[in-house]
Amino acid sequence: MPTLLRIDASAQLEERSLTRHLTGLFTRTFLAEAPTTQVITRDVGLTPIPAIDHHFIHAAFTPPEDREPWMNARLALSDELIEEVAVADILVMGAPMYNYGMPTALKGWIDQVARIGRTFSFDLARGDRPIEPILAGKRLVVLSSRGEFGFARGGVRAHLNALDPGLAACAHYFGVAPSDIETIAIEYQEFKDDRHRASVETAEARTRALAMTLAGAAAQAA
C-alpha cells in the first residue's frame, strides 16, 4: 500500500489557492487509480510551522541520550514531521512562488525536517562532503504557481527562479534524488489572460497524467 504525503504551503485560502487545486487534483486522481493509498495531509500554509530558534538547535544537536525533557518537547513537532516523510513513498508539494522563492511556511517545514541524526548524518571523515542523507527512494512532485512566466530552464526569468533550485538543493533531506523530482507550474497568474487560462489547463492535464502514471507504478509494485 503506497503512502502519499500531501504538503500545502500557500498562504491563500483554499478556494483561492491554485496550488491546493493542483495538489487536490493529484491526490484524487492518484486515489482513483490506487484506492488503497494512505494519504497524509500537512497544510503548513494555513497552520504554519514555528521557525527554528536557538532552543531548537541546542536540542537537535544534543545526543538523544543526553537530552533534557524540555529538549524532547521542543523536538516533538519535528519528530512528527519527519515520521510523515519517512513513511511516505511520494511527497506531493503545493509550492507557490513568492518573491521568486519558496513561501516562509515551506522553508519552516524544511528546517524542521532537516535534522542531524534523523534525515542526514554528518561526518568530517568524508572530507569536503560530510553530509549524507539517511532517507532514500522517495519521489517529489512539486505543484506550483507563478505570477509571471518563463521561470523554467532557458526561460526569460530562469535566473530569478530561487524556488525550484532551493527545493532541489534540500530534496536529499526528504530522501529524494534530483532525478526523482517532477515540477508542474501554472504561470501568468498576475496577467489573468488567455495565457494564464491555457497554463491552468495544461497544468491540470499534466497533473492528472503524472498522478495516473505514478499510481499505476505504485499499484504494480504492491
Image: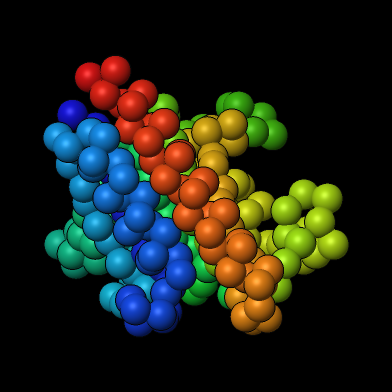
Instruction: Give residue 52's position: percent from left, percent from top.
Output: 41, 69
Asked whether the viewer can see residue 113, the reply is: no
Asked whether the viewer can see residue 47, the reply is: yes
Q: Is residue 138 above or below residue 93?
A: above
Q: Residue furthest front?
A: 194
Q: Quadrant of residue 178?
A: top right
Q: Residue furthest top?
A: 221
Instruction: Give residue 141's position: percent from left, percent from top.
Output: 46, 46
Q: Nearer the viewer, residue 160 or 16?
A: 16
Instruction: Give residue 62's position: percent from left, percent from top.
Output: 33, 52
Q: Relative to 208, is 219 on the left or the right? A: left
Q: Nearer the viewer, residue 184 or 132?
A: 184
Q: Is residue 2 above or below residue 42?
A: above
The residue located at (33%, 32%) in the rendering is 215
Q: Relative to 149, is 83 on the left or the right? A: left
Q: Is residue 41 above or below residue 138?
A: below
The residue located at (58%, 69%) in the rendering is 197
Q: Quadrant of residue 9?
A: bottom left
The residue located at (18%, 64%) in the rendering is 73
Q: Relative to 62, is 168 on the left or the right? A: right
Instruction: Give residue 173's position: percent from left, percent from top.
Output: 46, 43
The residue located at (29%, 18%) in the rendering is 220
Q: Nearer the viewer, residue 142 or 197?
A: 197
Q: What colour scheme has been applied to the protein in the rendered image?
A: rainbow
Q: Quadrant of residue 19?
A: bottom left
